[in-house]
Amino acid sequence: MPKLSAKGAALPASPIRKLVPFAEGAAQRGTEVLYLNIGQPDIPTPQVALDAVSNHTVKVLAYSHSAGFESYRRGLLQYYAQHNISLELGDVMITTGGSEALLFAMGTILDAGDEIIIPEPYYANYSSFAQSSGAVVVPVASGIEDGFALPPIAQIEPLITERTRALLICHPGNPTGYLYTPEELNQLKDLVLKHDLFLISDEVYREFVYDGKKHTSVMSLAGLEENAVLIDSVSKRYSMCGARIGTLASKNKAFMATALKFAQARLSPPTFAQIASEAALQTPASYFEGVLAEYTRRRDVLVAGLNQIPGVFCPLPSGAFYAVAQLPVDSADRFAEWILSDFSFEGATVMMAPASGFYTDPALGAKQVRLAYVLEVEKLQQALRVLAAALDAYPGTQR
């Protein structure tokens, strides 16, 4: 048999999707599966975006500019200006999803053997993307006890070596829902400037911030112009995950010129998805107000319900639409598999993402799960009943 690549073999399986066969098995048995494992919003996509595709006037489905439609990029400049982010046209590139923006950013910054520091738990694909560049993820652990706040700088700085090229944060966080404070962002700013590193900020959940708190972008921090890199996407903001349109932005001209080489190598982002995404910029503010109110209700129901189950602890997230819960079980991976393969309550079961896959050291998340509150309140309440009953029945529950 021909030999496969070592880097491919080393890539971890997705903690979000690896239980799909067990969920499919449950569904085939007639069990209702409540999907809390993946950040797929059920909120309708803005009609203005759907109409733009339905009413398009495209006659030839041609390549676009490798950096994306100029009209869309100019529209994004106005969008970002509303969020205190001042950019020029050359500072913005359209990518095939936020995933490609991450791949381009890491490819532009990291060589084989270079290091990137990431607070964990972190979005599992960060590790896969870093490995694709031959780079090494250096994790710094945050704790569930304080809601996954930024670890002290005194804990981060000793991890910086001559091979360190960047720090990467998700703000607000996936999987934790943590929102970095302006004070924490300024601490990171001082650190990367001191050591001349890049600060990559994945801000795809910018609109999902609760309790009257405000999101501060790293791109709005004065003095960080040469060091800040923004990752963005329409997937969550407009409930357009299938569009696969993201954004890579930086005021560092050399960074953007190099990233454009990667964009040219893949030719161009998809045309119809750009049409929809550009139109989505016209989404009225009322849409986001309604979405925010709905996710606030869902968050409050889920987190309160989790903390009422004996032995479960879940901090209150301030952003995104995820929560990480500590469960009283021997193994969250085994429990997440068992609840799909061997358990149902009132005809239903729950699919979760074991948090072990969000850590470099899986043992740190051995008893944690990520739950996405992307279902309506009634379904979340049902999921809580199923989860409580499952913990009562699971052979490995430890209370």
Image (spheres, grey):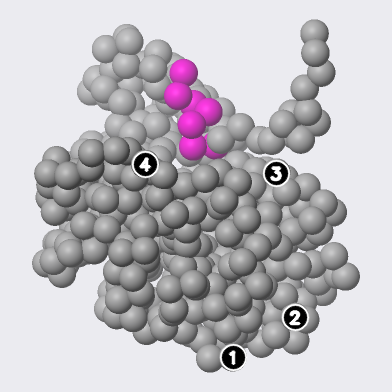
Picture quadrant where residue 63 is located: top left
Q: Amino acid at mark 4?
A: Ala
**Left or right of 307: which side holds 195?**
right
Q: Describe the element under mark 1 as helix, strand or loop.
A: loop
Q: How far apart are labels 3 and 4 at the CA level?
A: 29 Å
Q: How far apart are labels 2 and 3 at the CA level?
A: 24 Å
- Name the residue that disc number 2 marks: 196
Image point 53% across, 55% down: which residue?
A: 101
Marks 4 and 1 close (CB-CB < 8 Å): no
Image point 40% across, 22% down: which residue?
A: 23
Q: Which residues are magenta?
A: 15-21
List x then y, in percent, for residue 351.
39, 32
List x then y, in percent, for residue 93.
47, 62
Marks 2 and 4 close (CB-CB < 8 Å): no
Q: Amino acid at mark 1?
A: Gly
Q: Which badge, 1 or 3, is on the more N-terminal residue?
A: 3
Q: Which badge, 4 or 1, is on the more N-terminal residue?
A: 4
Q: Which badge, 2 or 4, is on the more N-terminal residue?
A: 4
Q: Nearer the viewer, mark 2 or mark 4?
A: 4
- Name the residue that disc number 1 marks: 223
Q: Amino acid at mark 2?
A: Asp
Determine if the magenta segment contains residue 19.
yes
Determine if the magenta segment contains residue 31.
no
- Name the residue that disc number 4 marks: 62
**Left or right of 255: which side holds 296?**
left
